[in-house]
Amino acid sequence: MHETALAQGVADILAEEARKAGARAVRKVRLTLGALSHVDADALAFSLDVATRGGPAEGAELLIDRPSGEAFCMGCGDTVPILRRGDPCPVCGGSQLLVTGGDQLQVTELEVI
Ligand SMILES: [Zn+2]
């Protein structure tokens, strides 16, 4: 389960940011998790809960945004939204798609006290 390793990475970022800000605790965390990232949001939330225990981000409110993926369709000659890798183009039904976005995991917002 690679969510555990990812969660540890996020927990490290949170602890580091809290330290830099001279904060006592992290109160709120917002993550962006692209729909094509192969990461299960529930598993990540659970792993993060475990990974932040005993640190400044313990008990922080967690928000996870799940933007849909983006791909360039050769048929349409345009960028289209897709939910899963391997999905056909939602506009023309074509299968010649090049994934261009939506596989990121980022900490986008952090509220410390
Ligand atoms: Zn298309």
Image (cartoon, rainbow, N blue to C red):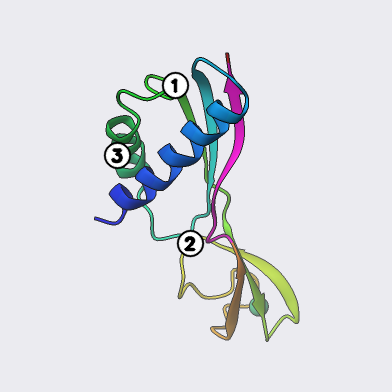
**Residue at image mark 3:** 47
Measuring 72% from the left and 80% from the top, which residue is drawn there? 76
Instruction: Identify the amino acid type marked 1.
Output: Ala
SS at mark 2 in the image: loop
- The x, y position of residue 5, in whole percent, is 32, 52
Whole-Å distance between the Cαs marked 3 and 2?
A: 19 Å
Disc on the earlier residue, 2 or 1: 2
Vertical arrangement, residue 93 with respect to residue 65, above or below: below
- The x, y position of residue 108, in whole percent, is 62, 39
Whole-Å distance between the Cαs marked 2 and 1?
A: 25 Å
* Prevailing SS of the magenta stretch: strand
Disc on the earlier residue, 3 or 2: 2
Whole-Å distance between the Cαs marked 3 and 1?
A: 13 Å
Left or right of residue 50: residue 62: right
**Residue at image mark 2:** 36
SS at mark 3 in the image: helix
Q: Nearer the viewer, mark 3 or mark 2?
A: 3
Q: Quadrant of the C terminus?
A: top right
Instruction: Identify the amino acid type marked 3.
Output: Ser
Start and end of the magenta stretch? 102-112
Q: Quadrant of the N terminus?
A: bottom left
Viewer-closest of 94 and 35: 35
Disc 3 Cβ-to-ligand 1 distance below 8 Å: no
